[in-house]
Image (spheres, rainbow, N blue to C red):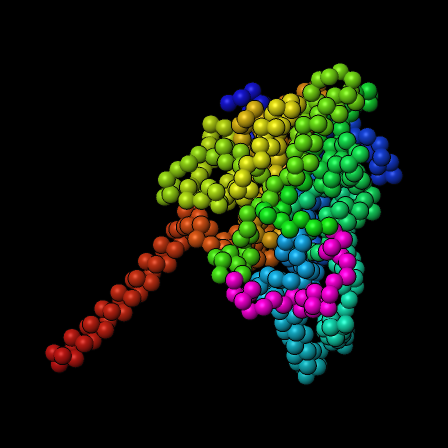
Amino acid sequence: MGTQMQSLSNTSSYAPLQASSQASSYAPSHAEQPLHFRSDGSFRVLQMADIQDGPDVSPDTIRLLEAAIEQADPDLVVLTGDQIRGYDPAWMRTFLRRRGEKIGDRVRVVTKFESAFREKNERLHQAAHNRIAQLLRLIHAKPETVSRLDTMHQQLDDVEQRMLDASEQHRDTTKEQLLDDARAKVRQCFQGFLAPMVAANVPFAATYGNHDFQCGILVDEQDDIYREFAGCLNPKASDENALAPEPGTFALPIYTQDGTRIAMSIMMVNSGDYADDIQQDADDTTSSNSDNDMAHARTGSTSASEQAAYMVNARGLDLADSDGYGLPSEQALNWLESVQHTLQQMNGDNKPVPSIAFQHIAPQEFYDCLKEVPAYTPHAVEGARAFSGRCFVLNPDVCYPGGMLGESIGCADTNAGQVERMRQAGGYFALYCGHDHKNAFVGHVHDMDLGYAPTCGFTSYGPKTKLRGVRLFEFHESDPMKYRTRMLNWGELVGGRSSNELRVFVEDHVVTDGASLRDELRRPSVFATLSAISASVLAAVSYGAFRISRALYRAVHR
């Protein structure tokens, strides 16, 4: 292993970081002040990946984030994409499957199903409360009990009325009104998961994933909404800004305690979304369209042939993404090299600035942290797309202990050379990603650390409740490259069950295609359970056959 990997090998055993007596110097009213190391020489970062929620952020997610911030006392939070669950039913009428399409067109089948289920669930709750109230009146329950139920009943009536009103207004809603509603829901979503950071006066920075834009509000506008919140460090992107060329791609210099020089830098990189995107101006998406386009926006309908073609794909239900993933833009890749020169000029010493990068989608080099194994190997995962047909486990020669490989690495089909360009630029010592919700490992390859944080959300697929969490980093001014990192999981921070263990169980075991089914069968617990069920069924069938045979024998020989 390389020397950097040696420095990380201690992370699996060191004690949980305690809240420092040196409070963070950040004040929300002075967000423009540069970040710098504390007086004890430390700087702490929390990586939060794949919150992936709708306007009403899961209370479990908020509990986890609050507990992580309280335990870690971070100087900065980095959000590494898919904060928004763009395919949530709340954004169904403005859903964009791919950039450049019409809003509300080609809505995912599972989104329509979830929307219908939510409406049905509301009505079932209302019917149940009506019935309970009637029964309580019949048995002469206390007036205050009946009153509380009446209040709940009225609230449910209000919910149903709002649903009916929304349905009536649906046909007359203009595209701009739909987008205004989508913006309000984006703002509500942000307010939900940013509340723990804002309350704790912790600054944050956000980049984007492949689902954020799908709500219909593109990432440049989302950048503006983020900046409405105290503590947002996302700079206004422009071609003239050497530190921030595009939304989601920017540098955050971290200065020494005395503020005289840049000790290290955190690079946020917009890793793209999907392959072969229809490149189109944001104005094309939000401007007025023809009546035919507006009909698509209102109904989300497509022709029968289009829907049939969409559904033919094994992943047509969009339980997983059927198209290949995108890459960072050429502008972002060039910037990763040029920004090192910018930082050197700012320091005035011509020395590479130690830098760690965060982005959503992992590049292909993450597969170099894995070892190919036979298909029958327990816990092995099957590669995706360009790596399909091959099975992998973590390579212990390059990965430090305690890592988790729970699913395939969902990278682009082509290699843009990002890791090599970072290596050639100098200064970069690590690249951390999200996107693959069940992965939480760090490996040392290509002269740098490549690592993951799993999902910290509870409204999309992921690992067991106890394994969902955030990644903590601690850097030291004297040598930022010798950093420490570890996971802060629900099991450690909160403990116990989530508020919806059934959903978590389903999301942990969801099967989207043949590869994910085979991965499930390679999980010893799943294989053992299925084997036990199969044995029980076989025993029952055998016993039934024996009983029938004995009955026939007796009938013949009577």
**Is 287 or 191 nearer to us in this picture?**
287
Which residue does the image show at 76% across and 43% down from the upper left? Answer: 197
Relative to 26, is 86 above or below? below
Residue 14 against residue 546 in the figure, above or below: above
Q: How many marks?
A: 0
Residue located 79% across and 22% down the image: 346
Q: Which residues are magenta?
A: 282-309
Query: Is residue 22 depicted above or below 175 in this figure?
Result: above
Q: Residue furthest top?
A: 349
Residue drawn at x 61%, y 62% as measured from the top left = 106
The percent coordinates of residue 498 (x first, y second) are: 61, 53
- Magenta run includes residue 298: yes
Q: Position of residue 34 (x, y in %)?
A: 82, 30
Q: Taking the image as drawn, is residue 37 in sight?
A: no
Q: Is residue 397 left or right of residue 107?
A: left
For the stretch drawn in magenta, the main secondary structure is helix
Image position of 504 (left or right of 155): left
Name the residue at 73% across, 50% down: 281
**Whole-percent x, y for residue 217 in the image:** 73, 54
Q: To which quarter of the image does residue 54 belong?
A: bottom right
The answer to if 330 sits in the magenta stretch is: no
Which quarter of the picture shows residue 10?
top right
Position of 88 relative to 229 (above/below): below
Q: Of residues 271 and 14, which is closer to you in this image?
A: 271
